[in-house]
Amino acid sequence: MADKSKKPAPNKPKFSAWWIYTAIILVFLALNYFSSSSDYGNPKEILENQVLTYAKDGDVERIDISKSKQIAYIYLTAEAEKKEVHAKPADNGMSILSSDSGADYEYRYATLEDLTDQLAKIEENQGIYISRKVLPPDNNVFGDILLTLLPIAVIIGIWIFIMRRMSSGGAGGAGGQIFNIGKSKAKLFDEKTDVKTTFKDVAGLEGAKEEVQEIVDFLKNPSKYTNLGGKIPKGALLVGPPGTGKTLLAKAVAGEAKVPFFSLSGSDFVEMFVGVGASRVRDLFKQAKEKSPAIIFIDEIDAIGRARGKANFSGSNDERENTLNQLLTEMDGFGTNTNVIVLAATNRADVLDTALMRAGRFDRQIYVDLPDVRERKEIFEVHLRPLKKVADELDTEFMAKQTPGFSGADIANVCNEAALIAARQGKTAVGRQDFLDAVDRIVGGLEKKNKIITPDEKKAIAFHEAGHATVSWMLEHAAPLVKVTIVPRGRSLGAAWYLPEERLIVRPEQMLDEMCAAMGGRAAEKVTFDKISTGALSDLEKVTKQARMMVTTYGLNDAIGNLTYYDSSGQNEYNFSKPYSEKTAELIDKEISKIIEEQYQRAITILEENKDKLNELAEVLLDKEVIFKDNLEKIFGKRPFEKPEGVEQKMQENTLPVSEN
Ligand code: ATP
């Protein structure tokens, strides 16, 4: 079936407001014409005594009487017209003699009898005869009708004009939405629309791809499953961090499914009018049912699918709840939605209403995680396809290793940024260094070589970064260092770049080592200058968060014990009250500060023991501005804890750079 919304608009003549204006002007002209044009020309109005005087003088030839208008039209004799008294004033103020076209005078009488009696008397006395004729009733009915109908016509005209403007808005015009406000705003993709995305464009995500492919298969061959008594699932929810390819996966489904695919975003249901959301949901499912088998894709479903609350601080949000209720009913209510599957994507499954997530609505939840090393390699390969790169120079495996914690969208961005960097430098192909620069640019921001930094500040930054590098080098569980730089970038003045291990579970000693390395910067300032500075802000922020998580989230603190105050449902996000007592709050604060202080002291001890190496490293850093792992090996010797290459890494929240100041 063809999509109604996609059909080209029928070829009706284009409506233009000028028609209305023209019509109104014409009506006015016509009225003017009908009311002013008469057979009597433009006679001068006179009073009764004048009529009688002229009659007595024998100037009047005839009188036509219009009873309907109560006007007597007076025609003068040819001789009388030549008299000065009947001369008509000309435009230039001079008098001209009366012409013989039309009546010469008109007299608006009150009673006709009076006039005729007076005339009869004159005739009798003077012995003259004045011809009198009663005119047939005035038949300029058309003009009268027009005059009556004109206001109505004008009002109707304006009304039509406004209605047309409102409904001719179509897809683009805002006005058209007034009448289509309750209609679904979903975009339809079917066999007629050319969607170029296929599963080949989605790298990695094997499990997720398989699941969505199966959903497509359900729709195409339902009997294969229903014959065994199975039911087709109603929906699948794609859940994962931003930029991991959920929308891309849905696009690939649209490209490959060969069934009508309705795509819209959660916010498309929302409008300023009450009841519109629910109406759009109804309309969406109605359209999908008409075209079944079909797939509905709702991106960012959390816009409408948030858990319904008893009371809402931000004011009542009944409209969103109504929309959600309608969605719940449509997905699993009395009405059957045969062969319509709902795909939805969200970053925050934890805030979704539990009724929405239950089996029978979103039967399947497909987790789309951040890609691991192997998947990142594949994503690089997909995005490198359109680029003109220096042959054989780029090792995608190396790039994948350089980008832990990157999402698919970040990798797409790296490839694009690399091409831009290469173009800026006037290169004809994109090379390895461009990609590395692009990674640095994305992680750290733009290099600011011309930022004004005093020599003292530069020295402090160098020692700070050298402190990070030294401490992390000495700790077993700290992430291996890639490079240290004191070139300002984005908002940071310098950075130590690490390659964090991608771990599935993290042990306390690993967390503590990372915190110690992060405190290494401030510790180096203290050890070297016996002064501290504001340069450690981002380190302190990171360390405080980590310590708080150890204590309140992961139950890794002895004093607090095996407790967590984390709520995966996201409900307590809006709570003002804490889930623990004041006493515990104090204890938590004390424990957090204790952990951080311990790690700070540990870093100071390490640096005091290796003060000469720290100085040496800082000097090299001041000299070269950027130093790599090799430079550190020259000073410290080989790092004893280095892991063998090729250990499969799993993702962790950490991204490069671990420390920046
Ligand atoms: P959000 O939750 O923020 O909407 P998302 O998960 O829907 O994010 P997408 O819009 O699908 O993210 O991805 C953004 C871009 O990232 C895609 O257009 C694509 O270029 C790239 N991308 C993400 N994942 C992949 C992947 N697995 N393979 C290839 N490209 C990917």
Image (spheres, helix red, strand yellow):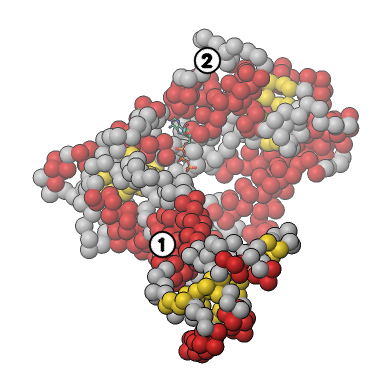
Q: Mark 2 sits on what residue?
A: 388
Residue at 70 percent of width and 30 percent of height: 446
Residue at 52 percent of width and 80 percent of height: 128
In the rendered structure, which amino acid carries the disc numbered 2? Answer: Lys
Q: Is residue 79 left or right of residue 604?
A: left
Asked where in the image residue 215 lies, by quadrant, the reply is: top left
- Asked whether 482 or 120 is in front, the reply is 120
- Residue 243, percent from left and from top: 49, 38
Q: Give the quarter of the figure containing the N terminus.
A: top left
Label 2 environment density (alpha carbons within 10 Å; few <14, some 14–19, many ≥20): few
- Residue 353, percent from left and from top: 40, 60
- Residue 454, percent from left and from top: 88, 32
Residue 400 at least partly seen? yes
Q: Secondary structure at mark 2?
A: loop
Mark 1 / mark 2, whichever is N-terminal: 1
Label 1 environment density (alpha carbons within 10 Å; few <14, some 14–19, many ≥20): many
Q: Nearer the viewer, mark 1 or mark 2?
A: 1
Label 2 CB sits under 8 Å from any ligand 1 atom? no
Q: Mark 1 sits on what residue?
A: 276
Q: Residue furthest front?
A: 127
Question: In this rendering, is residue 219 above or below 280?
Answer: above
- Marks 2 and 1: in contact by CB < 8 Å? no
Residue at 56 percent of width and 26 percent of height: 416
How far apart are the two marked residues, 1 and 2, measured between alpha carbons?
A: 48 Å
In the rendered structure, which amino acid carries the disc numbered 1? Answer: Val
Q: Is residue 110 left or right of residue 229?
A: right
Q: Residue furthest left?
A: 227
Q: Is residue 281 left or right of residue 577?
A: left
Q: Give the quarter of the figure containing the C terminus.
A: top right
- Asked whether 409 or 472 is in front, the reply is 409
Residue at 48 percent of width and 43 percent of height: 241
